[in-house]
Image: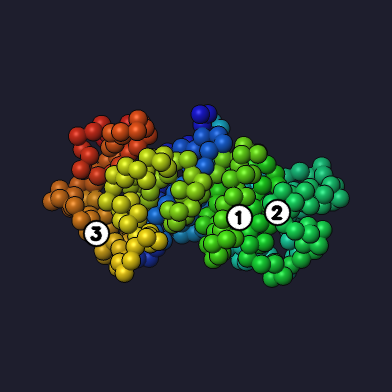
Amino acid sequence: MEELLNISNLKTQFFTKKGIVPAVDGVSITISKGSVVGIVGESGCGKSMTAMSVMQLIQKPGKITDGKIVLQGENLLKYSKEQMRNVRGDKISMIFQEPMTALNPVYTVGKQVTEAITIHHREKSREEAKEKTLEIFRAVGIPEPEKRFYSYPHQLSGGLRQRVMIGMAMVCNPKLMIADEPTTALDVTIEAQILSLMKNLQKERGTSILLITHNLGVVAEICDYVYVMYAGKIMEQANAFELFKNTAHQYTDGLMKSIPKITAQKQQLYNIRGMVPNLMRLPKGCRFCPRCEKAMPRCFEQEPPLYRVKSEYGDEGHYVRCFLHENSEVKEDEQP
């Protein structure tokens, strides 16, 4: 498939009085045109910070210190602030984690969506922008769009607010849509509707999606390829089917085991022992080794590269950061 976005060795650090926080530490991600790519991991692992780095919305004392973010052959890190403003919303859009805080409470949702249109398409009149907004409201399944156009965010349910956010993200037909925990705080029926909506829009419009989530059920539902992130690093990456059928990293395995099973009776819920490390005091060697059930002495001394996983399903895009697979070849961009 044709490549749309290539993130290479991305490093985003926060320079605080107590020390440097490596929030995103050498992350490489590839997104093909028309695909849905997921980044999964616990809170604080760097998922959202990776997305914010792509959008170049990192606030001080944070700073992107290394790497490339290449969109259709253009390195966005070389763009000026004005150029990035034109990219946001038009070529790359983002659905933020909490729609109630992402939407401005003092403006109607219709006004906020039409503003997104007029910023990027100044040739459109207010009437044309309004008609385009109503069109996108219908596309994302908002009932009575003419009435909702004049509603304020607090007058809408959580599911409707999220649909407005998706509509705002899709209204300029971006090449890539970044969805940061788009179903957080929604009940399961609304979550299913939102995921179905995103998948349908992706198929109809050919928009690629980068999905940020901690929910492996969501990953299984709509993702084509998955990156598992921990403490700022990619620990495992594979297509979704391969990841669930042939889990290679102990962290990914722990996330899988943590999912409650409907068939289990009086079974204690599994939890990964220990805590996510403080990014200013990372353990030596593998970042997951203090919590790993299969940690070896060398794990506490050396950080493993990404090794190719031999797949019984014929997938060649499966890699894992673990010495248990050291007999396999190292990923090219991980070579010393």
The disc labelled 1 sits on which kind of residue? Answer: Gln
**First of labels 1, 3 by sequence position:** 1
Foreground residue, 45 or 327? 327
Q: Position of residue 280 (x, y in %)?
A: 32, 60
Give the CA separation, mark 1 to mark 3.
36 Å
Q: Are marks 2 and 1 in contact (CB under 8 Å)?
A: yes
Residue occupying the far left of the picture: 297
The disc labelled 3 sits on which kind of residue? Answer: Arg
Q: Secondary structure at mark 2?
A: loop
Q: Residue at x 57, y 61 (%)?
A: 189
Label 3 sits on residue: 291
**Eye-nearest disc, 3 or 2:** 2
Label 2 sits on residue: 141
Q: Are marks 3 and 2 in contact (CB under 8 Å)?
A: no
Q: Position of residue 277 (x, y in %)?
A: 30, 61
Q: Secondary structure at mark 1?
A: helix
Q: Residue at x 49, y 48 (%)?
A: 221
Q: Residue at x 22, y 50 (%)?
A: 285
Q: Residue at x 68, y 57 (%)?
A: 164
Give the CA separation, mark 2 to mark 1.
10 Å
Label 1 sits on residue: 193
**Eye-nearest disc, 1 or 3:** 1
The disc labelled 2 sits on which kind of residue? Answer: Gly
Q: Position of residue 147 (x, y in %)?
A: 81, 62
Q: Is residue 328 visible?
A: yes
234 to the left or right of 194? left
Q: Secondary structure at mark 3?
A: helix
Residues packed near mark 3 inside 10 Å, few (<14), some (14 to 19) or many (20 plus) = some
